[in-house]
Amino acid sequence: MNHSASRILIIGGGFSGMSAAIQLRKQGAEVDLVEIDSGWRSYGAGISLGGATLRAFRQLGILDTFLSEGSAVDGLQAFLPNGTPLAHLPTPRLAGPDVPGSGGIMRPVLARILADATRASGADIRLGCTFARIAQDVEGVDVDFTDGQRRRYDLVIGADGLYSKTREALFPDVPQPRYSGQAVWRAVLPRPPEVQTAMMWMGRVKPGVNPVSKDQMYLFLTEHRPVNEHVDPATFVDTLRALLADFSAPLVQSIRDQIGPDSQIVFRPLEALLVPRPWFKGRVVLIGDAVHATTPHMASGACIGIEDAIVLAEELARTADAAQALQAFQDRRWERCRMVVENSLRLGQIEMENGSKDEHGQIMRETTMALAAPI
């Protein structure tokens, strides 16, 4: 590891922060990771992953574990509400010829896999702790922590998510996350034999399923909600079942019948954020959702955050000049992340407006191919 960033603090123990810790420890850096949640919990149902994410898992060294605990499949099938086949979207095999081009896994399971790898890396992990104050000079960063400690670092990485306190401290005037006009429902259900790959039905709302293990799948459904309002969890089962009522496809109706109180239903309004450049100031840099939170239309939010971690580690290893490394990181990441955020938002807009299916398909194809390019 170059001497300008041999001691590094990562703020946030989500997917991006853990990935950064794993990669930087491989390069010999001393890494502290602080996570404000003392239980280091990950909420949610399933998560869909593209080939670029599986390629990143290979670089992190967790691909084999993912393959044993999650699900890897090829392609995405689209149907009309009555079950008539509409299209098949291929997913390139980016992680290797022997690894399918897409997949899914329970979000808490992926978080555990990454947490185990982070612990095994030798990073110093402190839970229930975050920063209280950051003060930097040309040579380093002094950080006061909420547990009363003070430490000095060569570099600080803010990976603390959509409502990042690091971003707020670094760039208090940047735009805030904005509601997209859509919300997503997710639920976990038994996986029937006919669900061998990701499947979606194109209607007034857009439901889909994706295998997440050998015997489980998760249901996802996006709907137009003009107002970002609270939804009572007591109504989740009835509301989700009602959203599927217009889909006459036998598989969808079978799924609808299975939804119940034990289906681990999660409801989330969809927000997005693209922070204008710069993404760093001095020796503090932001990665992941802290700078580019996307809606899930391209199943690439986790992907681009994990890629951030890999690219940042690569650039820090290339030069002893921290400012040069951070600029190179930003230059490599900006266009790719902008594309995912803005194209995902456009897909949602087309869905809400019942717009051009041709444009929708073209954006999905072009974005998929762009994500296949090396990072």
Image (spheres, rainbow, N blue to C red):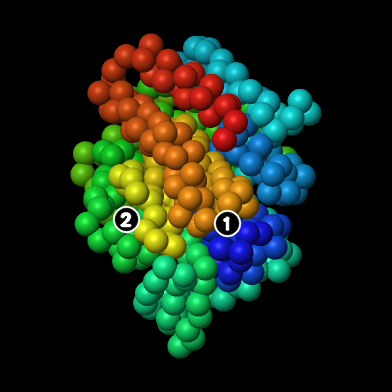
Image quarter hosting the C terminus: top right
Where residue 225 appears, as percent x and y from the top left, is 26, 39
Residue in the foreground of this view, choosing between 180 and 55: 55
Image quarter hosting the N terminus: bottom right
Residue in the foreground of this view, choosing between 39 and 370: 370
- Residue appearing at x 48%, y 50% in the figure: 324
Q: Is residue 109 above or below residue 351?
A: below
Where residue 91 appears, as percent x and y from the top left, is 61, 23
Where, by quadrant of the figure, is residue 341 drawn?
top left
Q: Is residue 366 something that shows in the picture?
A: yes
Where residue 37 appears, as percent x and y from the top left, is 49, 71
Instruction: Give SS at disc 1.
Output: loop
- Residue appearing at x 28%, y 39% in the figure: 180
Where, by quadrant of the figure, is residue 118 drawn?
bottom right
What residue does disc 1 label? 320
Instruction: Give SS at disc 2.
Output: loop
Report the Cα–Cα distance between label 2 and label 1.
Answer: 53 Å
Task: Give the left or right position of residue 143, taking residue 40 as reference.
Answer: left
What residue does disc 2 label? 232
Disc 2 residue crowd, few under 14, some 14–19, many 20+, Cα 10 Å: few
Q: Is residue 244 above or below residue 165?
A: above
Q: Is residue 35 something that shows in the picture?
A: no
Disc 1 residue crowd, few under 14, some 14–19, many 20+, Cα 10 Å: some
Q: Earlier in the sequence, mark 2 or mark 1?
A: 2
Total marks drawn? Answer: 2
Q: Are marks 2 and 1 in contact (CB under 8 Å)?
A: no
- Residue appearing at x 71%, y 42% in the figure: 58
